[in-house]
Image: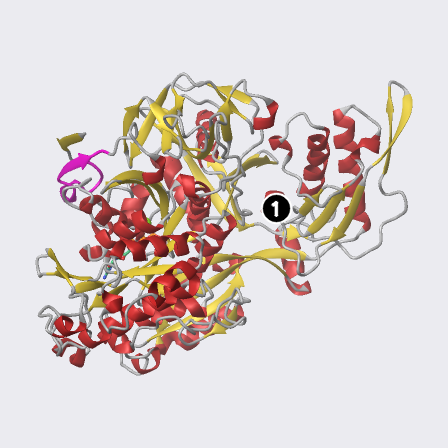
Amino acid sequence: MVLSKCRLRGIRQNAIGCIIRHYATASVQNPSRLRNMALVAHIDSGKTTLTESILLKSSYLSSSGTVDTGSTTTDFLRVERERGITVQSASIPVKWKDWTFNLIDTPGHADFGMEVESASRVVDGAVVLIDSVEGVEAQTRGVWRQLDRYGVGTRIIFLNKLDRPGASFRSSIQSLLKHRLHKNPMALTLPVASFNHQHYAEGEPGIQGLVDLVRWNVLKWDEEGRVSKHPLPRNVTDLEKFNILPASHPLSSHLVPARTQLLENLSMVSEAFMEILLGLPSDPSAYLQIDNNIIMKHLRKASLDGHVLPVVCGAAMKHIGTELVMDYVGELLPSPTDVNHQLQAANSPAQLLAWKVNWDDKRGWMTFVRVYSGKFSDHFPLVTRQTPLLNTNRNQKEKVSKLLLLYASETKEVDELPFGSVGVILGLKYTRTGDTLISSGVSGSFRSKLRDITPPPAVISASVIPRSHSDLQPVQNALEALTRTDPSLRVDVQEGQILVHGLGALHLEIVEGRLHDEWKVNFELGRRYVSYREALGPLVPSPNWNVWETEINGKPVTLTSPLKVRGLEPHEKGDPVWDGNIVIDEKGKPIPTPESMPGLPLAYAAEGILSALSNSPHSSLPMTHVHIQISGLKNIGSKIPSLITGAIATALRKRIRDAGFGPILEPSVSLKISVGESNLGKVVKDLTERGGQVLDLEDGSNTADGSEDMGGYSDDGVYIPPDWLSPSGSPTSHSRSRSSHVKRSIQAIAPLSQFLDYSNRLRSLSEGHGVFEMSNAGFQEVNEERKFEILREIGRA
Ligand SMILES: Nc1nc2c(ncn2[C@@H]2O[C@H](COP(=O)(O)OP(=O)(O)OP(=O)(O)O)[C@@H](O)[C@H]2O)c(=O)[nH]1
Ligand SMILES: [Mg+2]
């Protein structure tokens, strides 16, 4: 179906113009043709620009917007358009050839990592973008780990911005190995910087074409951005006479070696493909004559098995490489039927994961779901408007009013959401981001939950002060609504003050903006504080710390709490669900939070643990890095839930008190700062004076997460393109740093508290020319002097 309409919208209306949209309808979707995929990457690598280009090339848009004019389809929030950054993920169905992609554009900034977290939870594959000037960056590794965590095994790399001076195809591929993203990156396309061989000699940057090494053709873009496709000759003699890349062009003699290495590398991970190569005649043209479909079939299998990491390239801003990426997404990324999802079984009842919940002024609560139900052999069911749903996290029945497919800020009503699809449900009252929904009335065995989406710990807080008394209720309602959509935002009331806790300074700024813009409530945000934590002290517990005595109906009752408590070992990593503590049962299985297992005795015990960990008897700070094991809960001998909660909380609090005042931890950030050579000294001095630690001063290659220390993967057997392939990428950062406008890059780790207003400070330290990126680097223990300062700050010393 094609809908066409002309409309103006957004804050910069002039850039939008007339839009023609081709909607992908879900009703005839065959799950094997579906690709649920996300675009993920470090901030500013071009995800939204590539999304916009995909929408244009798939005829969803008749003209594309740009991030720079605030006119893209997916960045539709005011804050996104004004700042040119993505804050929330947006999902769009795209029809391409006979595939349907549910494409999710995600934010790159670490403060909105939660959005990537929930997108990773519901996709089957991902395209990871890399700015080919920068190579792999901090957040590239961050999103890579997120995809690992959610089992999104199949990924395609898109090396973007090859038009930029300094872009290097070679260094970008090397950086994949250096940062241990994959052992076997495989370039499927080569960039043609220019069709004029002279430009290579002159080191002229750019990108005018692409060679598709699998399909064996050349794509050439002219000045107006029109593309023409030229099949490459399938024998070596004709290839020498190919007029698009004549013998004088440096690429022409490189094409056969690049294709050969691609095929031989593939044969190393696929015995079946090795057989094919071994069966070829000994003719120099034999490798050029293998059928595209055969290569693609083996490449698909190797990609799905994770044996290779396909790499394609281009410049999203110029729409170069967009169609190729779409082709390879269709060819190589998994369909819902290729992935073995938790709880996905044939003929099981409807199961959905709410991966995003949004408020919309016109439609009310919109719940974005991924459908994981089984029965896909028989007309791919099965969520219709009549399907009564049960939210298993909240044990609440929910009623659907409408089902929609989403087109960024627009929607289309549908009759059913088929298996594997990503859609929207209207009318749900209780569901929050991360909840599981199932058809209600099904047997208990299907009532297990899909895996939760866990927000990282909050590191920064501020008080929310309503302007007047009458503003209090609207402010509370707005905060309640915002936390339903953004689980990484937490709200509580302490000593009569409303506090919001977020993942970083930018997160709170955006929250402030959204409360004003979207909920139009009157308030001010107080001073921002970073959140501190206390860890377990070193002392030995007193005897019988776990025995609790009370009276019920006048009779004495003694309860012994079945807890083993200790501090985390250095190699143990705290569970974000428990704010960096580890809470396990007697078999060592992690215990979920109390609200996700309502009514169970374990939930009452977990409630007690949560309460004791929420503030230390020494500092009143939340506890972290504590290891707690509950064993033998049945022996606690009481069926009165509040007693279990009370006994466990009291015992644990006593244990924490006995252990003595523990170390204090504060949130740290990892910083990448780029400044002119002349200001380097001032910036470094300021960093170290404020407790920062400089990790690297040159090309930013050292990393705070230690991935460098482990050494990169070997390039044995991997096709490493030659340097000259990117004419402008050749000067090394060393020789570039000799030029007059030299930028130096500093990698550092520093306490967040000292860097809340860093943009202003850096501006003055660097005469306005410095730029920086900041991401969370976890909680770090502070020294005695800083501990005293912190205790004074929180009124405890
Ligand atoms: N030269 C060049 N610039 C590009 C290209 N693609 C994107 N850009 C620019 O890079 C900047 C960031 O692009 P976005 O598309 O917003 O990047 P993003 O990855 O969506 O950023 P976040 O969502 O904020 O993480 C914008 O100024 C784009 O115009 C490209 O191919 N070449
Ligand atoms: Mg974006």
Q: Quadrant of residue 699?
A: bottom left
Image position of 313 with respect to 469: above or below = below
Residue at coordinates 58% horizontally, 33% vertically from top-left? Answer: 496
What's the image's color scheme? secondary structure
Image position of 426 with respect to 100: above or below = above
Would residue 615 be found to the left or right of residue 341 on screen? right
Q: Secondary structure at mark 1?
A: loop
Residue 16 part of the magenta segment: yes
Residue at coordinates 16% horizontally, 31% vertically from top-left? Answer: 2
Disc 1 packing (10 Å; few <14; some 14–19; many ≥20): many
Residue 19 part of the magenta segment: yes
Q: Please tell me which residue lies in front, 170 or 542.
A: 170
The amino acid pointed to by label 1 is Asp
Image position of 505 with respect to 680: above or below = above
Identify the residue position indicated by label 1 in the image: 579
Residue at coordinates 49% horizontally, 52% vertically from top-left? Answer: 148
Q: Which residues are magenta?
A: 9-23
* Residue 504 visible in the current orientation: no
* Residue 190 visible in the current orientation: yes
In the rendering, at what x and y percent does residue 739 appear?
A: 27, 81
Q: Quadrant of ligand 1?
A: bottom left
Q: Quadrant of residue 601?
A: top right
